[in-house]
Image: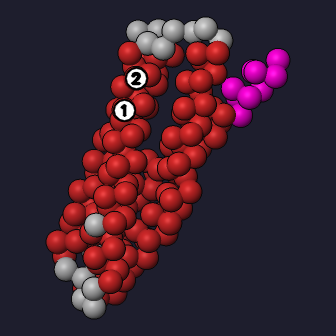
Amino acid sequence: MLLNLIWAAMLTLHVLCISYWVGGAVYCMQLPRITRALEAVPAQAVQLQGYGRFLRGLWHVAPLALFSGAGLVGLMMYRGLNLDWPYHVMGALGVLMFILFVMTAMGPYRAARRAMRPQPASFKAMRRFAVLTVLLGALAITMGGLGQAGL
């Protein structure tokens, strides 16, 4: 009974974290379209604020997602359940998404934030990272579904 409650709480936390992560990346992908009607300088300011808020939240959410995923794996092993290949792929994709997040935060976002006049290349790089995050996240979610289906 207690293990079931722990499992449910950990799974809920994990799903909420991944929802924020992938959903925020979808929002960041749309930022250039959202700011299209603005002049260049205000559009860049809005984009920087959008990316900044998302990335600040992700500094808290991403480790929680990794730890809750590891906790779910630990509970599965404790119960003696077999970890099928989709769970291994999902874990690897989660680590790749974390590396991609750190690269974005420390690379193009930091450069754009510190620049007097951010270059459009920084925003393109951040958008590419957001697109890749969405693709990896969708693939990881698919792997979780395949794991639950027992494939």
Residue 132: horizontal and vertical position, in percent? Answer: 28, 47
> Total of numbered circles in the picture?
2
Question: Residue 52: horizontal and vertical position, in percent?
Answer: 44, 71
Q: In the displayed structure, does residue 19 sit left or right of residue 135? A: right
Q: Quadrant of residue 69?
A: top right
> What's the CA distance linking mark 1 and mark 2?
6 Å
> What amino acid does circle 2 point to?
His
Q: Residue at x 41, y 38 (%)?
A: 94
Residue at x 47% of width, y 9% of height: 150
In the rendered structure, which amino acid carries the disc numbered 1? Ala
Instruction: Give the main secondary structure, helix, strand or loop, of the magenta stretch.
Output: helix
The answer to whether residue 151 is visible is yes
Furthest-bottom residue in view? 116
Residue 142 showing in the rendered view? no
Residue numbers of the magenta segment: 1-9
Q: Residue at x 71, y 34 (%)?
A: 9
Left or right of 75, for residue 138: left
Most extreme residue toward the left, as rendered?
A: 121
Is residue 8 found inside the magenta-colored segment of the image? Answer: yes
Residue at the limit of the structure toward the right, as seen here: 1
Residue 108: percent from left, percent from top: 27, 69
**Percent of width and height locating residue 76:** 60, 17
- Read off the residue under disc 2: 88
Q: How is the model colour-coded?
A: secondary structure
The question of residue 118 being in magenta is answered with: no
The quadrant of the picture occupied by the N terminus is: top right
Vertical position of residue 21 compared to residue 94: above or below: below
Looking at the image, is 75 positioned above or below residue 26? above
10 w.r.t. 24: above or below: above
- The residue at which mark 1 appears reads as 92
Marks 2 and 1: in contact by CB < 8 Å?
Answer: yes
